[in-house]
Structures are given as C-alpha cells and as structure tokens.
Image: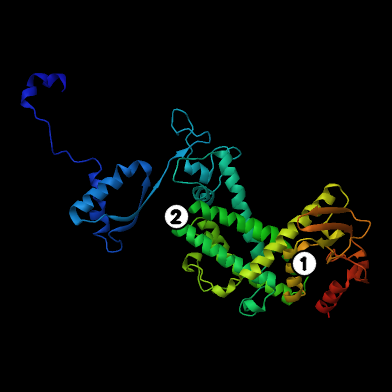
C-alpha cells in the first residue's frame, strides 16, 4: 500500500469483483454481432495475433459459452508478428520499424525509400507464412515489387494485343480452337481452382506461388512467347490471330478477378483498360469465375507437358549456340530430333495428327525456322545434345531470311522497298493491300 495508508491497512479490503481487462472486447459478440442485422452470430471468423489465444479469443469464448452455451466464432485465424530483415523485433530504440505509410507513399528520399504502393504491401502479406513471425524490409519489398511488375507487364501485354478484338464478333467454342489454345484455357481453369482453394483455406502464400508460376512460366515463357508470331505476323482477321486474342481476353478478364482480393488496385486498373465493353463497370462487380469443366483435358495436359519438356531441352541446346556466339536469334536455326523416349515421340505424333496446322506446329512452338524428327543425324551441325529424351541437333537454317517474320525459307519473293518475303508473308501482304 502507499506509505500514507500503511497505518490504515486494517481498514482496507482487497477487491474481489475486478473484471478481466479483456472482458469488454471479449463481449463484443453481444454488442456487435448479435445487435447488428448485417452481421452473423456466431461470426464466421475471428482474426488476431497469436498472443490473443490467452486474450480476446479466450475471453470471447468464455463469455459466449457462459451466456449462450456456444462459441462466438466458427473459426479462429491467428498470425505472427512482423520482424525486421535480420529477424529482430521492431522497436523505436533500435530504429528498425517499417512504416506502412512509407512503403505505400515513399519516404523523403525516394531513392532509398521508394513509393511501392498499397498493392506491393498487400502482395507481401500474401507471400509470407503468416502463422509465424515474418520479416519485412527494403530488400524483401524490392523482390516483391519485381514480382508485381511481372504480373503487371503480363497484363499490359494481354491488354495491348486485344486492342482490336471484339468478343461479340470473334467468339469460339473450345473444340474449335487449336490444341495450344485448348490447353491454355484448361490451365486457366486449373489455376482458378487452385487459387480459389487457397483463398478458401486462408493459404495466401499458395496464391502468391500459383500466380507467379502462371504469369511467368505458363504465360510469359511459353504461351505468349509462342503467340508473338500469331499476333504480329498473321493477317488482321486470320483465325490463328483471332483465336489467340479470344484466349487472351479470357485470361485477362479472369486474371483481374483472381488477383482482386490481393492486388485490388491493379485488378481495377486492368478492368478499366479492357478495350471492349463489359457488363460490369468494376472488377468487383464481376463475381468469381465459373468455367465449364469440359475445358479440362487430362490427355491434352499430358501431351503438352511432354512437349514442353522437350522444348526446354532444345532451348538449352540453342542457348548453348547463342552463348558461343555461333547464332543470334533462335530463328537462325533448324532442329533435328532423334527420339529415344517413346512418350515424347508419341506426343509429337499426336500433335501432328490432331493439331491445327497453322498453330500447332512444333517448329513454331520452338520459334525456329524448321523442326523435324529424324532417324539419322546430318553432318555440319552446330551442336548435338544427348539426354534422356534423345539426341538434339542444332544446324544453321537453310535459305534466306524473310524481312517480315524473320524465318529462313528456301523460297522468297520480292516485296516493297527491296524486301525479301517468304511465301506466307507475301500472301498476307497481298491480301491486306488488295
């Protein structure tokens, strides 16, 4: 007791009716959930830091069970705390506090403290395992901003290449599309299912991983890389171009929806720049994507996976030539493949039999001037690679370079201003200008 009251200690009695300090927030289920018609009791979710297992979560549970004999929540989600990049607890004395406002708006020195925007901060939240303490700092944010830019650049590429596309005129059924496009739409359904499942289970780091893989591996490094010839070289209304635009429109619309819970500003930015009219003014009015399960095709997936594996090995061989400065672009080469893997050989036969001849050519998937399956390798090769899939031979492309598509062809035609065109480009030019 205070010194002034020590002599009166026999007159004082210890209080026994002190309420728990968390009682007021612990009873919020009564003051908030029960009394507001727009809310539910029990609540779907209580979210707080891991220290609240003995605080808010506990006092809420005790009071609700005592009064109504049921818990005030259906689920509890707990998270750790933010640390600096060295794993130390943030404190003013150490000066290692990361201010969210500075992350979003930037500091006084924009070189050392750039403005990343709210989306990068939200992307960081989605990228970490929030069940434990997580580090954050300038280096981590820079890495996240690089991922953010990759997603944004992918979206910009998609939007830029559907500038003249109208879904009311050029819509397709999936069985009308080339195999590559069918696979891409099936992959979109798979990614949607995976991201939906990650959101529903609060596994936001899975969303981050799936999004990064989809945009970089499936889109930028594969589908869109192959699509450049279809988009840039084809005539304006040619099927191989319009079918690609159809797929890209489906991807960009649904990509905007899939990222909207995390990258909300980017999602709305994408939506406002879709070049054709949509029913919804905002991405947040769209509703979650629902696809026909007929878009999934396991046999198609298996064949494409085999061919992508072969594509990776061939690209390694081409890159070896490029590193030795034997060639510049991949289109300066032709590829001979002597298969030793029956699975890959069967997939190549499947592609030749069922693929669209204007799109599903493995030569175009490799972005080389020619590709052929051979029983013997020819002489004068630039490089021969041996691996489990077979022997890959890279040779210098025969013929003359087309000034328009850059493919090497044995037969070329005179174009305007002394240009040399392959037969395909010559026909397209004549068609467009007649």
Secondary element at image label 1: helix
Q: From the viewer's perspective, is 254 left or right of 2?
A: right
The image shows residue 214 at horizontal and vertical percentages of 61, 59
| Residue at image point 48% right, 30% down | 95
Vertical arrangement, residue 375 with respect to residue 355, above or below: above
How far apart in space, not on screen, are marks 1 and 2 (Cα)?
Answer: 40 Å
Query: How many circles with numbers are drawn on the protein?
Result: 2
The image shows residue 326 at horizontal and vertical percentages of 88, 51
Which of 1 and 56 lies nearest the eye of the viewer?
56
Which of 94 and 109 lies nearest the eye of the viewer?
94
| Residue at image point 77% right, 69% down | 361
Examine the image and state in which quarter residue 13 appears.
top left
Examine the image and state in which quarter residue 381 appears.
bottom right
Q: Judge whether residue 297 can be spotted in this image.
A: yes
The N terminus lies in quadrant: top left
In the rendered image, which residue does mark 1 sit on?
A: 362
Checking the image for residue 231, the label placed there is: none
Q: Nearer the viewer, mark 1 or mark 2?
A: 1
The C terminus lies in quadrant: bottom right
Scheme by which the image is coloured:
rainbow
* Marked residue nearer the N-terminal end (1 or 2): 2
The image shows residue 235 at horizontal and vertical percentages of 77, 74
Q: From the viewer's perspective, is 393 left or right of 191?
A: right
Vertical arrangement, residue 121 with respect to residue 225, above or below: above
In the rendered image, which residue does mark 2 sit on?
A: 202
Vertical arrangement, residue 4 with respect to residue 29, above or below: above
Q: Judge whether residue 237 can be spotted in this image.
A: no
Which of 245 and 81 lies nearest the eye of the viewer?
81
Q: Residues within 10 Å of mark 1 (few under 14, many from 20)?
A: some
């Amino acid at each position: 007791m205070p010194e002034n009251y020590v002599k009166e200690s026999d007159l004082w009695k210890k209080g026994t009716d002190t309420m728990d300090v968390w009682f007021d927030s612990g009873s919020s289920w009564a003051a908030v959930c029960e009394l507001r018609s727009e809310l539910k009791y029990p609540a779907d979710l209580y979210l707080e830091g891991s220290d609240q297992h003995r605080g808010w979560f506990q006092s809420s549970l005790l009071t609700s069970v005592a009064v109504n004999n049921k818990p005030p929540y259906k689920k509890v989600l707990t998270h750790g705390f933010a640390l600096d990049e060295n794993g130390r607890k943030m404190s003013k004395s150490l000066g290692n506090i990361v201010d969210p406002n500075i992350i979003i708006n930037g500091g006084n020195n924009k070189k050392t403290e750039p403005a990343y925007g709210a989306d990068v901060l939200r992307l960081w939240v989605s990228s970490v395992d929030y069940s434990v303490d997580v580090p954050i700092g300038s280096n981590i944010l820079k890495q996240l901003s690089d991922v953010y830019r990759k997603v944004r650049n992918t979206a910009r590429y998609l939007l830029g290449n559907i500038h003249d596309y109208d879904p009311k005129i050029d819509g397709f059924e999936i069985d009308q599309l080339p195999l590559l496009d069918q696979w891409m739409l099936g992959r979109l359904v798979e990614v949607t299912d995976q991201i939906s499942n990650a959101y529903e289970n609060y596994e936001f780091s899975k969303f981050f991983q799936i999004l990064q893989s989809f945009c970089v591996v499936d889109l930028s490094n594969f589908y869109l890389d192959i699509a450049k010839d279809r988009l840039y070289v084809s005539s304006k209304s040619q099927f191989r171009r319009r079918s690609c635009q159809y797929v890209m429109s489906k991807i960009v619309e649904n990509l905007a929806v899939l990222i909207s819970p995390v990258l909300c500003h980017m999602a709305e930015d994408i939506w406002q720049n879709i070049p054709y009219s949509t029913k919804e003014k905002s991405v947040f009015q769209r509703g979650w994507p629902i696809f026909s399960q007929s878009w999934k095709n396991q046999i198609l997936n298996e064949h494409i996976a085999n061919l992508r594996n072969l594509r990776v090995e061939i690209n390694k061989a081409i890159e070896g030539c490029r590193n030795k400065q034997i060639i510049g672009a991949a289109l300066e080469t032709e590829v001979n493949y002597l298969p030793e893997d029956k699975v890959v050989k069967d997939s190549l036969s499947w592609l030749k039999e069922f693929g669209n001849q204007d799109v599903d050519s493995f030569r175009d998937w490799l972005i080389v001037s020619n590709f052929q399956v051979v029983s013997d390798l020819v002489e004068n090769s630039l490089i021969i690679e041996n691996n489990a899939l077979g022997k890959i031979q890279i040779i210098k492309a025969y013929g003359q370079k087309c000034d328009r598509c850059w493919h090497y062809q044995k037969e070329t035609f005179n174009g305007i201003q002394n240009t040399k065109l392959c037969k395909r480009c010559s026909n397209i030019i004549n068609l467009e200008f007649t």
